Image (cartoon, rainbow, N blue to C red):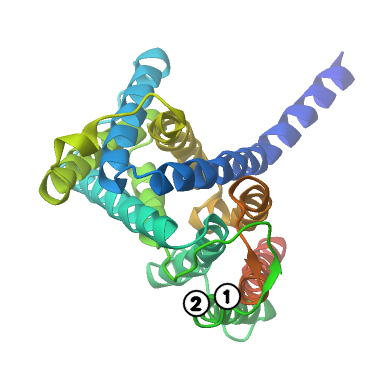
Amino acid sequence: MEIMEEEEERKETKFERSKPYILCVFNSLIGAASNIVSKFSLDEGMSRYVLIVYASALGTLVTALLVLLFERKNESKISGAICLNIFILGVLRTLGRVTWFAGLEYTSATFSASITNLIPSMTFILAVIFRMEKLEIGKLSSRAKIGGTIIAFGGATLMTLYKGKSVISFHKALHHSHHQNAAVSVILQARLIKKYPAPMRLTTLIGVFGTLTSAILAAIIDHKASSWRLPLDFTLIAPLYNGIVIFGIAGYLQTLVVRKKGPVFSTSFRPLSTLLVAILGLLLLGEALRLGEILGAALIITGLYAILWGKEAEKKKN
């Protein structure tokens, strides 16, 4: 009996260790689909500002239901400082999505997904500034993290300045440069979840502020009544998918990973999403893969995994 109990405990421990990896892979899969769905709807004329409002509102409703089902007994208290941080996260999420959707309109889904691989490097820099990551120049692990950050930035610069010839293409696609920066949000989220350990409720409150912010922004910039009408066709999938799956489920899962493994780890699976977006964009949207994008993405991924190697080396020594 004791041997069986010990084996069950080992299995449970192994599952708990692998859970963050499973959640990150799942988030990469649904994130890749979001790129494709959003790109299609934006190309069909849906307003990026209205899309964010509807998606944020739906995501907030989903997480609010999860709170009622699973976190009603959570007694974590909200202070004024926590409320301010939640408001900032809501604003950052809105601004991040606005710039990301704008970039998605003017570029390809593959380019947008590739350039977001910079986020782990930026997260690492901010984590060092806020003393959430150790940096000792004399250690190989620290030099790997620094070198990886420089290489990743070099790859992003290459992607932006050099397009190159089309390597694989089924149809003609548009290409301009733009990128998203979500690193500040991840760092702030990592600090906030320690002070307010209620991930579902936290995701809901961020959604509330994000919805209010995006609604105000949309009312100012795009107040035409026609922009707010949702057509009963495939473009309707974008607000539904982004709201329920991305703003709701994925936002909550990211909070769980950040709480357990930290901000840098939670962004380390973006290269997987980039690969999936490249394949889907090529097959479904007819996007071309250009030489500059391939070389730049390779540098970004190399730099990213140099950073991750440095982190793992530090953990083994500790």
Number of other residues with Cα within 10 Å of mark 2, as a class: few under 14, some 14 to 19, many 20 or more: some
Residue labelled with disc 1:
152
Residue positioned 40% across, 20% down in the render: 66
Circle 2: element type? helix
Q: Position of residue 129 (x, y in %)?
A: 39, 72
Circle 1: element type? helix
Residue positioned 32% across, 40% down in the render: 51
Q: Earlier in the sequence, mark 1 or mark 2?
A: 1
Q: Position of residue 34 (x, y in %)?
A: 51, 42
Query: Which corner quadrant holds the N terminus?
Result: top right
Residue labelled with disc 2:
160
Number of other residues with Cα within 10 Å of mark 1, as a class: few under 14, some 14 to 19, many 20 or more: many
Q: Is residue 225 visible?
A: yes
Distance, label 1 to label 2, CA atoms, is 13 Å
> In this view of the protein, which residue sits in the foreground, 230 or 247?
230
Q: Say left or right for 199 vs 135.
A: left
Residue positioned 65% across, 77% down in the render: 165
